[in-house]
């Protein structure tokens, strides 16, 4: 046998296997060793308006496709079957239809059951490659049923007129299309079912279906997550679960409706609060604030405050995986380059999270002690209360003109501000919050220019300050 012949032979076998697969796919659905129990629960519910709220890959589309085929074939194992049904499969776009719902329907549809296919685009000989409009299916009563494919992005008008036995939504439809479809199934007392991951947050589906605020007795829903799908690889579930943050997991794995409360500092505006660095008058220099981390980044910022109490974040040290010696040196270097003030004993002074008083794993000394030995006297007496801290910081950002400015070189603080999201239970997601913590500790010290308290501002200083602000910030 030549190579060419061999390849041809293999291809033929593969083709045959594939064909055999789709001849038997429906027969094998949840009949083998592995059974998706939640899919069975969904199929056996007798309600007229059924939904699956599931994570991605939890097995939603699979059960929607099988449900649609059973209704079309008149072979539903858990329901009174109807003759010659007409149903719609609604996807979010034609492309998604081709790749997802249509492809699953073709997978479970034995080719012998297909009487005809009407294409929307593409060739009838290769329906999987094109967009199907309608599949005409031979049903168990000797007649034919029809499954029509619809795309929600075509608008509500395209959904008018028909009288239907069922509508399947694969992924969340817009409300107007859902409502139009409810009208379509009314006279035949047909079924609505939807399979979706709640990626749109607390949308109309949350109100109408999940909360069922009208207490419609025909509404049913079931949730599915990765662990419910026995066809997923356990090791992969484990790996993915570790790599995703809490909020992502809540929707993507568990299919939960999440309130999207947005950014903690939503009033932070890069165009307003981030400024080009300039030489800050020495009298404005105030405090350094540190959020310690060893494996996590250690975040340290240098804060200045003008005579009106406006804050300037002028420099940043932010690195992970380094020891205290390294961090102390880096902070001292920045201090020297800025000509920062040192205490009479020659120490640099800084605020630090009170956790720094605990001993480090490696030795008998605490982080505070290690810093002190390297020339940085840290003050662990910081206010750590999250809520009052956040609300105080928020005030600084929302004030107009702003009461806080961040120098462009503090890139990590800027990045964290842009990605500091609310999570569950009114607390921010604990992900990237190191600079957010040192900022909070600092602002909770009620920054004001202490120089001003000691010595009343001289006229020329006042004038100089005004000039700087006018020139640099236009305020
Ligand atoms: N009953 C089943 N029998 C065999 N395989 C199944 C079954 N249910 C789910 N699977 C497999 O699990 C995987 C995910 O299923 P499915 O595509 O239905 O998930 P989904 O929740 O719709 O995912 P997505 O959010 O990506 O749309 C697929 O590989 C599918 O073949
Ligand atoms: Mg799907």
Image (cartoon, rainbow, N blue to C red):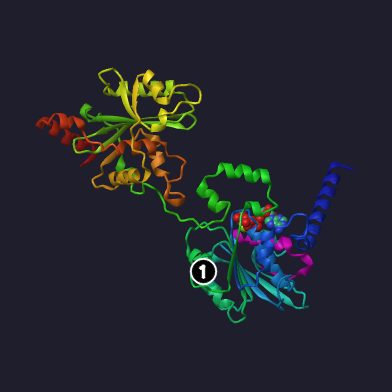
- Where does the magenta region start and end? 96-118
Residue 229, picture quadrant:
bottom right
Q: Is residue 301 above or below residue 325?
A: below
Q: Is residue 202 above or below residue 262?
A: below
Whether residue 278 is visible: yes
Q: x, y percentage for residue 275?
A: 30, 37
Judged from this view, the residue extending furthest toward the right is: 1
Q: x, y percentage for residue 437?
A: 38, 38
Q: Secondary structure at mark 1?
A: loop
Judged from this view, the residue extending furthest toward the bottom is: 187
Which secondary structure is most common in the magenta stretch?
helix
Q: Residue at position x 60%, y 44% from top?
A: 240
Q: Quadrant of the C terminus?
A: top left
Whether residue 155 is visible: no
Residue 4, picture quadrant:
top right
Judged from this view, the residue extending furthest toward the left is: 459
Which residue is tagged 1? 212
The answer to whether residue 114 is magenta is yes
Q: x, y percentage for residue 53?
A: 58, 60
The answer to whether residue 105 is magenta is yes
Q: Quadrant of the N terminus?
A: top right
Q: x, y percentage for residue 44?
A: 68, 68
Q: Residue at position x 71%, y 62% from top?
A: 106
Question: How many neighbours does mark 1 have within 10 angstroms: few (below 14), some (14-19), or many (20 or more)?
Answer: some
Q: Is residue 455 above or below residue 101?
A: above
């Amino acid at each position: 046998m030549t190579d060419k012949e061999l390849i041809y032979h293999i291809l033929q076998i593969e083709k045959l296997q594939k064909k055999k697969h789709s001849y038997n796919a429906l027969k094998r659905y949840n009949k083998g060793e592995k059974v998706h129990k939640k899919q069975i629960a969904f199929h056996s519910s007798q309600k007229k308006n059924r939904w699956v709220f599931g994570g991605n890959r939890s097995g939603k589309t699979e059960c929607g496709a099988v449900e649609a085929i059973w209704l079309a074939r008149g072979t539903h194992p858990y329901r009174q079957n109807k003759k010659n049904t007409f149903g719609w499969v609604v996807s979010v776009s034609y492309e998604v239809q081709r790749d997802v719902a249509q492809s699953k329907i073709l997978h479970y549809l034995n080719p012998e059951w297909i009487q005809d296919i009407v294409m929307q685009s593409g060739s009838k000989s290769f329906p999987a490659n094109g967009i199907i409009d309608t599949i005409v299916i031979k049903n168990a009563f000797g007649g034919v049923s029809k499954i029509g494919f619809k795309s929600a992005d075509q608008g509500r008008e395209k959904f008018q007129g028909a009288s239907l036995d069922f509508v399947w939504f694969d992924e969340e439809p817009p409300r107007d299309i859902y409502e139009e479809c409810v009208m379509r199934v009314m006279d035949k007392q047909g079924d609505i079912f939807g399979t979706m991951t709640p990626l749109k947050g607390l949308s109309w589906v949350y109100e109408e279906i999940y909360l069922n605020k009208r207490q419609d007795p025909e509404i049913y829903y079931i949730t599915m997550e990765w662990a419910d799908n026995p066809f997923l690889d356990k090791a992969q579930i484990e790996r993915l679960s570790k790599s995703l943050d809490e909020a992502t997991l809540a929707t993507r794995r568990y299919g939960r409706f999440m309130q999207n409360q947005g950014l903690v500092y939503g009033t932070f505006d890069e165009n307003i609060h981030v400024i080009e660095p300039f030489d800050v008058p020495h009298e404005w220099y105030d405090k350094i604030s540190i959020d310690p981390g060893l494996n996590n980044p250690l975040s340290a910022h240098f804060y200045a405050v003008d005579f009106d109490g406006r804050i300037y974040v002028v420099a940043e040290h932010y690195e992970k995986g380094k020891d205290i010696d390294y961090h102390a040196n880096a902070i001292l270097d920045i201090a020297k380059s800025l000509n920062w003030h040192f205490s009479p004993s020659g120490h640099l002074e800084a605020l630090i999270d009170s956790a720094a008083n605990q001993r480090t794993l490696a030795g008998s000394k605490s982080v505070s002690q290690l810093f002190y030995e390297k020339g940085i006297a840290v003050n662990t007496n910081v206010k750590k209360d999250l809520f009052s801290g956040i609300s105080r910081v928020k005030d600084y950002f929302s004030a107009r003109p702003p009461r806080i400015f961040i120098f462009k070189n503090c890139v990590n603080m800027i990045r964290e501000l842009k990605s500091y999201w609310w999570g569950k239970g009114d607390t921010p997601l604990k992900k990237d919050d190191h600079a957010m913590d040192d900022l909070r500790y600092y602002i909770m010290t009620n920054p004001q220019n202490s120089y001003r308290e000691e010595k009343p501002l001289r006229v020329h200083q006042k004038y100089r300050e005004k000039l700087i602000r006018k020139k640099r910030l236009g305020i």
